[in-house]
Image (cartoon, rainbow, N blue to C red):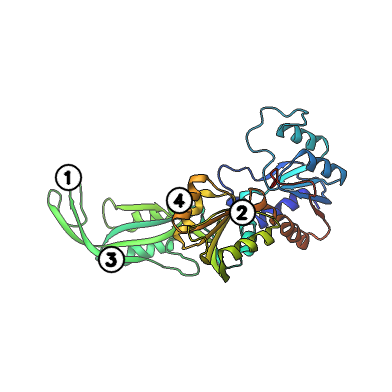
Amino acid sequence: MILRQLCQLFEKIAPPNLSADWDNNGLLVGDPEADVTSVLLAIDFTRDVLAEAIAQAAELVLCYHPPIFKPLRNVVADELSPAGRVFAAIRSRIALYAMHTTLDAAAGGTNDALAEVLGLRDARPLAPQQGDGARYKLVTFVPQEAVERVANAIFAAGGGQIGDYSRCSFRIAGTGTFLGGDTTHPAVGQAGNFEKVDEVRLEVELPAARAAHVVAALRQSHPYETAAFDLIPLVDLDERVGLGRIGSVASPAPLAEMVERIKRGLGVEAVWLAAPADDAPVVSTAACCAGSCGELYRRALAGGAQLYLTGEFRHHDAIEAARAGMAVVAVRHSVSERLVLARLAKRIADTAPGLTLRVSESDADPFRWA
């Protein structure tokens, strides 16, 4: 399979627009026109993973954590530094692709895998993804007798479309006032007089691409010498994707039982647990976020979660969460992420059956219980 085509498949699984602004996802090293027959999946691109990729003749390493995160000042042979491993990958003709916060936020990604461990039902993001800001709301003020003419002009120019509905608007009656100067020629009343006019506040939504056309239509159709209007950017929340997950537990259970469920699901012998004083709440609502997601725990609290599962958690935040009645389970950073690799390999294999896909055997969490 051509690498460029494979990247397109990856982008369908974890769309680039889901990336956090501080992150570095996508194709980081490689020739987009190169042929790829074997892919190795790993959390981190370590020396051991590099050696494994070379031994298996993998043309691509699909990494969770970006091998290139901060800008590289140089790329020279060096066994210890990230730049040295990038150099070795280029020399060995191994492409590198990162799927980090894009996979975290995507449907069916890292956080949905954690939500399954908790047994969540109807899981939704803790922090829904903001849209691309490609829509506006236009607000203008029109004399009552001219409302239909102005509205029809706005509709014809592309305003008022919401999904499969057209000619959408909101209207409310009010009073407009003005005092025209000596050089004005008001459509209503006279210059030099303080005028009060019965007006309608007219609101419509529109695509950003049609903004100039809609404003031109407004100005042309509006009876006033100078039409007053506001053009407001809209923030769209896509509640299907985003960081973290929260939902109701399909089989509510005491905290101790939930902890055992987590240990079995993630294959770990022990976890860090910060719990309320009684240490035994029945967990009916739970939340999770892979990696370092301590900053989202307040959203979990606000959503009524009795348990928050994450990779690592700050000391003072754990005290605050427990005092507020929510238990926190921290399983180590990459442990909270590793579960997704096998699932990701299967999704890719189902779409590109000709590829050889392996989850790295040498990739491991740097910490262990001792």
Residue pictured at 82% horizontal, 56% vertical? 355
In the rendered view, does 119 fall on the left or right side of 7? left
Which residue position is annotated with label 4?
320
- Judged by depth in the image, the label closer to the viewer, 4 or 1, is 4
Residue pictured at 61% horizontal, 67% vertical? 119
Q: Is residue 208 visible?
A: no
CB atoms of marks 2 and 1 within 8 Å: no
- Judged by depth in the image, the label closer to the viewer, 3 or 1, is 3
Query: Which disc, if any, is residue 181?
Result: 1
State the residue lying farthest toward the bottom: 251
Amino acid at pointer 4: Glu
Looking at the rendered structure, the secondary structure element under dot 3 is strand
Q: CA distance from mark 4 to mark 2?
A: 25 Å
CB atoms of marks 3 and 1 within 8 Å: no
Q: CA distance from mark 4 to mark 1?
A: 61 Å
N-term mark: 4 or 1: 1
The residue nearer to you, when weighing 11 against 274, is 274
Which residue position is annotated with label 3?
172
CB atoms of marks 3 and 2 within 8 Å: no
Decide: few, some or many residues near mark 2? Use Cα within 10 Å; few <14, some 14-19, many ≥20: many
Looking at the rendered structure, the secondary structure element under dot 2 is helix
Query: Which disc, if any, is residue 315?
Result: none
Question: Image quarter for residue 217?
Answer: bottom left
Q: Is residue 152 visible?
A: yes
